[in-house]
Amino acid sequence: MGKTRSAGARGKAPGAPAGVRGCRARPSANPFEVKVNRQKFQVLGRKTRHDVGLPGVSRARALQKRTQTLLKEYKERDKSNIFRDKRFGEYNSNISPEEKMMKRFALEQQRQHEKKSIYNLNEDEELTHYGQSLADIEKHNDIVDSDSDAEDRGVLSAELTAAHFGGGGGPLHKKTSQQHGEEGQQPKSRKELIEELIAKSRQEKRERQAQREDALELTEKLDQDWKEIQTILARKTPKSESRGGKEKPKPDAYDMMVRELGFEMKAPPSNRMKTEEELAQEERERLKCLEAERLRRMLGKEEGEHIKRPKHMSADDLSDGFVLDKDDRRLLSYKDGKMNVEEEPSGEASSSESEGEEGKGSSEGDPEESDGPDGPSGLESDVQSKDGSERTQEEQRPNPGERSTADDREAARAELPYMFAAPESYEELKSLLSGRSMEEQLLVVERIQKCNHPSLAVGNKAKLEKLFGFLLEYVGDLATSDPPDLGGINKLVVQLYNLCQMFPEAASSAVKFVLRDAMHDMEGMVETTGRAAFPGLDVLVYLKIAGMLFPTSDFRHPVVTPALLCLSQLLTKCPIQSLQDVVKGLFVCCLFLDYVSLSQRFIPELINFLVGILHIAAPNKQSQGYTLVHPFRALGKNSELLLVSDEEATTTWHRRSLPLQWAGRLKAQTETEANHTRLSCLAVCLALVQRCVTVYGALPSFHDIVQPLRALLMEHLAARSCPPELQELSRSILTEMEKQPKHYRPLVCEKSKPVPLKLFTPRLVKVLEFGKKQGCTKEEQERKRLIHKHKREFKGAVREIRKDNQFLARMQLSEIMERDAERKRKVKQLFNSLATQEGEWKALKRKKFKK
Amino acid sequence: MEGEAGPGGARRALGRLVEAVLADRGKANAVFDILAVLQCEDQEEVHEAVRACSRLFGALLARGELFVGQLPSEEMVMAGSRGATRKYKVWMRHRYHSCCNRLGELLARSSFQIKELALSTLMKFVQLEGEHPLEKPKWEGNYLFPYQLFKSVVGGLLSPEEDRSLLLCQFREYLEHDDIRYHTMQAAADAVARAADGRPEQVPLAFWNNAFTLLSSVSLPRQESVPSNFYVKHAELSDKWKVVHLREHRKAFQQMWLGFLKHQLPLRICKKVLVIMHDSILPHLAQPSLMIDFLARACDVGGAVSLLALNGLFILIHKHNLEYPDFYRKLYGLLDPSVFHVKYRARFFHLADLFLSSSHLPAYLVAAFTKRLARLALTAPPEALLTVLPFICNLLRRHPACRVLVHRPRGPELDADPYDPREEDPARSRALESSLWELQALQQHYHPEVSKAASAINQALSEAEVSIVPLLELTAFQIFEQDLQKKGPEPVPLEFIPAQGLLGRRDDLCAQHFTLS
């Protein structure tokens, strides 16, 4: 109750100021009733709603409303009777008044009929016309005919006067009004209606006629006018006639052609062929970009900031399934020699053909693509399409060039099938490759790749990913075989590289797997025996391959960083026990230095190892100025492994590279050969030292790092047992060491930013929209709004209830006062009457007494 | 005698003999048969014989049918005209002795089962003999323990010929009993003294090993408590007995160890002793400072031994007010490149962290240590670097005076490093005038974690120290595994220069120095 009322009051509230404003606009507003709410601050952009108010007016309105609702309720609070308005359709607004009347009348009739028929059997149904009983009408025959209305216009019949002026209800009217209740007006309105109707129809008739006459007049006028200007338009007449007859113009053939050509999809302009210089330039750009990326990774910049690596192979390489076209070409040329030259022009021609086709196809197919590509991507797609055409051609005519290759290979190749299923297991691959020459093996691997290209079937990608692992295993097998087939590995590396470019993830996990395997073996050996032997050649080959497949200069790389640790372990955990170990160790050192050749990172283990190698080659060990660390011992069984005391061997030695096969298996050598090997190892070691000196020359404590090396080199020089070439090398290394600058600049920390003092300035928040809670989600905002609204409503309701109570109390008080006053009045009256009685009685008594 | 073949038969036969001897004194001569089986070579039979002996003499001891008191010689008693019962008892006790001797010999047998059985039988005899002493108490409540028998047991355990660590492991169970422990300590001290008496340098390694195993398995209770867990059950414990006082135990413990360590021990034993020194020896000694001789000697040996000795020394200095002037100098001397490659690396750094944890150390000393460690880090493998770099940073944090090593704002540029690595005295090494250029060099280390750790000195060091405890036990293999598991960027970056062959490009070192064939 209070709620609804308050809602009503609230509904008024916003309206009130508008009213006020209206009041202000009106000059009649009483200035004494206006209350102005003064604002302390003017806030820009804020809308004030309650700056002025009319307290008197609004209070009066509220009071009135209360008297109408609350007071009424209060007064009827104990009354159970209520007045019910049962008139038919009184409050139904859907029904039009006429209808309402009709229905009410029908109802009335029905009721009457029923009632009478129950008790009064004789009575007939009274016939009426327009609600008046016919009998009545018959009685008063003087009802005017509507048709004759026009004649006796001025005369007012008794009925008419009654109807119009509601004058003294005649007897006939008494009766009808008694019957019809509130429908007493009916006969009057009917007459009026008829009169009006007639008048209206007459007027309409007149108007219609006038209109028709006007129209006729205008048509005639128009015709005349037309005839006048017809002569002027005489020339154009036939054309307009023809146009009117043909309706649609027949388009000209030429026009049609032009239109059609205009709307037809154009073949997109293809990029022109690049010139040599441009290609070179592009290649340089690409390499520059890649190099910049590599540098960034080398410095270990924030991983977060790295942008998507610009792929030198097209980004959709995997889905589309193409090896970099350049590599592909190189592959072919590498394999097929001069055949490449033959194939080139034909491929070119077919490519141009297919490009034309493709252009058309794309114009029909997807228009986005045709206008989409810009710059490099366009180039790429171009390249791809060329590549694709090359491929398709190759597929259609399988290896046309191969028949024209050298004769000696002809026979062997003829035996090879052209289709190979991708091997599902390592054994399968091995069985495919076993017993074939290296060239054939390569061909087989290549054909496996071609036949199972990811673009050809769904599962091919996984198959080729597996192939990488199998190939890696195969390479390991080749390396451990006796003698190690390094030539084969040398060729397979290229395949591995290509596969790796296609499937980086699979390749990285495969390489990681073999590295982990190797480390596991070594760790197990260290745990059981306390030291490890140098692993086989396969591990070294794996490490080398890892360095070729992945960028070694990255600050952190998922494959290269573990590989570096692996190398470090080889150098620190494996003691040198034979000449073979020396070769392996030196190879590991070379690998290590190759890994860091770009990043120039510092490897303590390498220096230790070189010190150790120089130590076991030194003739007289004073062991001054350097200390050996773990895998090497100052004294012991192998402490003179590289020492050459044979003069003859020294003089006959010539410097040459070490065969990598020795790392796998060192064949028995004569004493002189062994000595030569030793000297070669020493030479490699010295070369590595030289490399270290150049690479690490810039390090801050370079001289402390190379100090043990220097001591050992001095020793070597002092002994003069080396061949002159090596002595010369040692001397140059020493001078180079000395040349490095000795700058010791004291370290200074980077200045850290001072921590700012805590400030108490208010936090400024940008307000984007007034009246809205900032900085939360939409649901939150909605929730807050509802809470706010509820609060406001609640307060309003409380206030209204309070005011209601006050009003009621006031009413009650006034009632009480009224009652009291009444009582006083009555008491006074009684007293008065009593006083008069008393007076009378006394007067009577006096009279008596007087008598 | 063993008419029936097989172990079952032998067992039954022996069982019958034992029953006969126990039932009837007249059949006592069957004991010889049993002892004879004890001598034979067959394992199963010996096994059965030991069991039989155990049963027989166990019963006899319990019944008190062995002669009590000073044992007269067999011939004398037999020849004499004393009572038959006495004769029987004396005779039987002689048989008991020979049985015990034989069991002692069995401790040297190759079969472990026999050894174990012999040991347990002997210990059973020890227990029974303790309850029913074979000597007369000199006064009321005299504490009697079969010393002789027990000594022979301990002597058998400390064999100079072979390593008996397994048997000693078995023996460890008995050491839980307070009395056995006490007497073991005494017996072991005796045995060691006897063994090393004549020619200490000729004592075989096996003996030292056995002795060390036995000695190290003796562990006294930490808290003060009255020994009450006795192997030999006594009706009531007397306060006058030495064995019930922990103080006496301590004394015996100390005597045992001092007697052991007095000798020129092999290096390996020495290391082992030093490893357990701080934990299980020093706290139980009555006078820990007596260990100084041994520790000082070990400290001068050099290498890992010195390092381990430092731990003991440090405890003596720290807890027992020992004066040892050259402690830090010795520690400084221990720092050489090999510390990063030895097995004791984790322990060394743990100890070094402990020794250098005081913030009252002079700045020159800490600076010298820092500089030396940094210098050594130039030859360290990555796993060691990951320990030593935070270690150095911690030192710098602890000693703000040493921060000049990484932050010297207006220092002049120098021609050479003022630090003298050859100087043995940290005070004169001029480390405070130097800077940690080595760490700057290590910022170029190939491993990313090392490089990061070394780069910590570039910024002002944070206040809180980094705990190096989790880094101490880090092995290269663990780092390798971590690196493998680390999620790299997606996709894996690839080399963009195409591979041409196994040896790589022309200018690669591999291609320069190696050929494929």
Image (spheres, grey):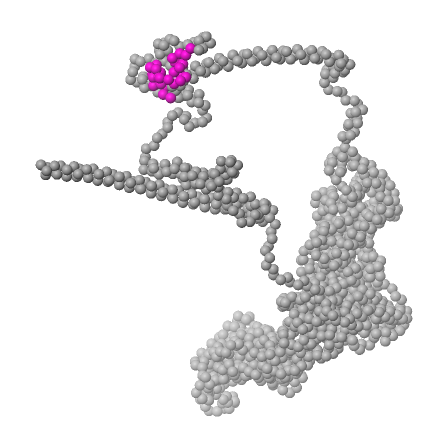
> Of A166 and A824, which appears nearest the observer?
A824
- The residues colored magenta run A155-182
Point 37% across, 27% down: residue: A86
Tell me, yes or no, if residue B30 can be seen here.
Answer: no
In the picture, measured across the screen, residue B19 lies left or right of residue A304, that is: left
- Where residue A173 sits, quadrant-wise, is top left
Which x, y percent locates residue B197? Answer: 63, 87
Residue B514 in the image: above or below residue B366: above
- Where residue A316 sits, quadrant-wise, is top right
Residue A315 in the image: above or below residue A608: above
In the picture, measured across the screen, residue A458 lies left or right of residue A62, that is: right
> Of A18 and B413, which appears nearest the observer?
A18
Point 45% across, 82% down: residue: B237
> Of A123 and A555, which appears nearest the observer?
A123
Please name the predominant secondary structure of the magenta segment in the image: helix
Which x, y percent locates residue B82? Answer: 45, 90
Quadrant containing the C terminus of chain A is top left
Q: Can you name the residue that lies furthest to the front here?
A: A850
Residue B34 in the image: above or below residue A10: below
- Where residue B113 sits, quadrant-wise, is bottom right
A347 inside magenta stretch = no
Which x, y percent locates residue B193? Answer: 60, 85
In the picture, measured across the screen, residue A121 lies left or right of residue A142, that is: left
Quadrant containing the N terminus of chain A is top left
Q: Across the whole image, how many numbered discs are drawn on residues?
A: 0
Point 13% across, 37% down: residue: A844
Which x, y percent locates residue A690? Answer: 83, 67
